[in-house]
Image (cartoon, grey):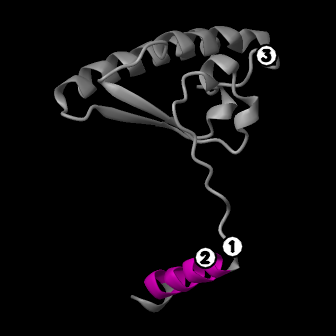
Amino acid sequence: FDQFPPHEAIVEIKELFKWANRAGHGGRNGLLLFVDEADSFLEDRATLHPSRVSVLNEWINQTGTESSHFMCVYETNRPEVLDPAVQSRVATAINVPPPGQKELRQLLEQYIRLYLLET
């Protein structure tokens, strides 16, 4: 939401959660909201630029109670910078280490096979 001025970001967050509650209501399992690089706007308010605190507060307000309509999944390389209120809403954290040499080799071989050898 950093691409929006703070007042627009708040409107976008409200619209996102209005949609998530509506769209997730009809599904048996609800909706998954995947937030890539969550630390970019859910950073600890102690280090966040003052103009962005209201954006963080809106996100926290929208995720303050459990929902059967949606679930948030956060991706970050820096979980320690997330605001404590955001961290308190995370039920399970999964650490995915970077691929090792064997996995990198397999990825490279797969890429070559799929995109360079196949026409």
Picture coordinates of residue 112, whole percent (x, y): 53, 85
Mark 3–mark 2 Cα distance, whole angstroms, equals 39 Å
Toward the bottom, the furthest residue is 117
Q: Main secondary structure of the magenta part?
A: helix
Nearest to the observer: residue 58 or residue 3: 58
The disc label shown at residue 103, or none: 2
Amino acid type, label 3: His
Mark 3–mark 1 Cα distance, whole angstroms, equals 37 Å
Amino acid type, label 1: Gly
Marks 2/1 in contact by CB < 8 Å: the verdict is yes
Quadrant in the picture for the C terminus: bottom left
Residue depicted at x 40% and y 30%:
71
Stretch of the chain drawn in magenta: 102-115
Q: Residues within 10 Å of mark 2 (few under 14, many from 20)?
A: few
Residue ID for mark 3: 49
Picture coordinates of residue 43, whole percent (x, y): 71, 25
Q: Tell me where residue 99 sits by quadrant.
A: bottom right
Q: Residues within 10 Å of mark 3 (few under 14, many from 20)?
A: few
Residue ID for mark 1: 100
Q: Tell me where residue 54 sits by quadrant.
A: top right
Quadrant in the picture for the N terminus: top right
Amino acid type, label 2: Glu
Numbered disc 3: secondary structure: loop
Q: Is residue 4 visible?
A: no
In magenta segment, residue 110:
yes
Q: Earlier in the sequence, mark 3 or mark 1?
A: 3
